[in-house]
Image (cartoon, grey):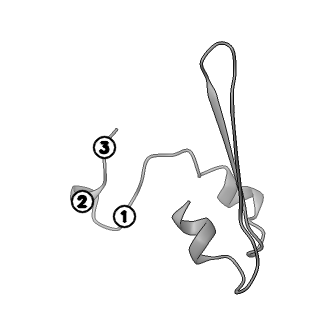
């Protein structure tokens, strides 16, 4: 959510949708008008948070 706000083009809208299935799973979709992400970057979006300093990386 934070990135959708920060990287949105000034004066444009953001869109957030959610859907809960009968099985209890939730799908969250976030869209903005910022620059499109390349496929190499998109594939990393579900990986654990990483920093330059391994000791400070968040663990699930």
Tally of numbered tags: 3
- Local crowd size for mark 3, using a 10 Å CA cut-off: few (<14), some (14–19), many (≥20): few
- Local crowd size for mark 2, using a 10 Å CA cut-off: few (<14), some (14–19), many (≥20): few
Q: Earlier in the sequence, mark 2 or mark 1?
A: 1
Q: Is residue 44 above or below residue 11?
A: above
Q: Secondary structure at mark 2?
A: helix
Q: Secondary structure at mark 3?
A: loop
Q: Earlier in the sequence, mark 1 or mark 3?
A: 1
Q: Are marks 2 and 3 in contact (CB under 8 Å)?
A: no
Residue highlighted by disc 2? 56
Q: Is residue 18 above or below residue 51?
A: above
Q: Are marks 2 and 1 in contact (CB under 8 Å)?
A: yes
Q: Quarter of the image containing the N terminus?
A: bottom right
> Marks 2/3: CA distance?
9 Å
Mark seen at residue 59: 3
Mark seen at residue 36: none
Residue highlighted by disc 1? 51
Q: Tell which of 20 and 27 is nearer to you.
A: 20
């Amino acid at each position: 959510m934070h990135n959708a706000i920060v990287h949105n083009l000034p004066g444009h809208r953001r869109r957030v949708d959610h859907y809960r299935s009968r099985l209890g799973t939730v799908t969250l979709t976030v869209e903005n008008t910022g620059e499109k992400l390349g496929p190499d970057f998109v594939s990393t979006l579900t990986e654990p948070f990483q920093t330059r300093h391994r000791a400070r990386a968040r663990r699930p």
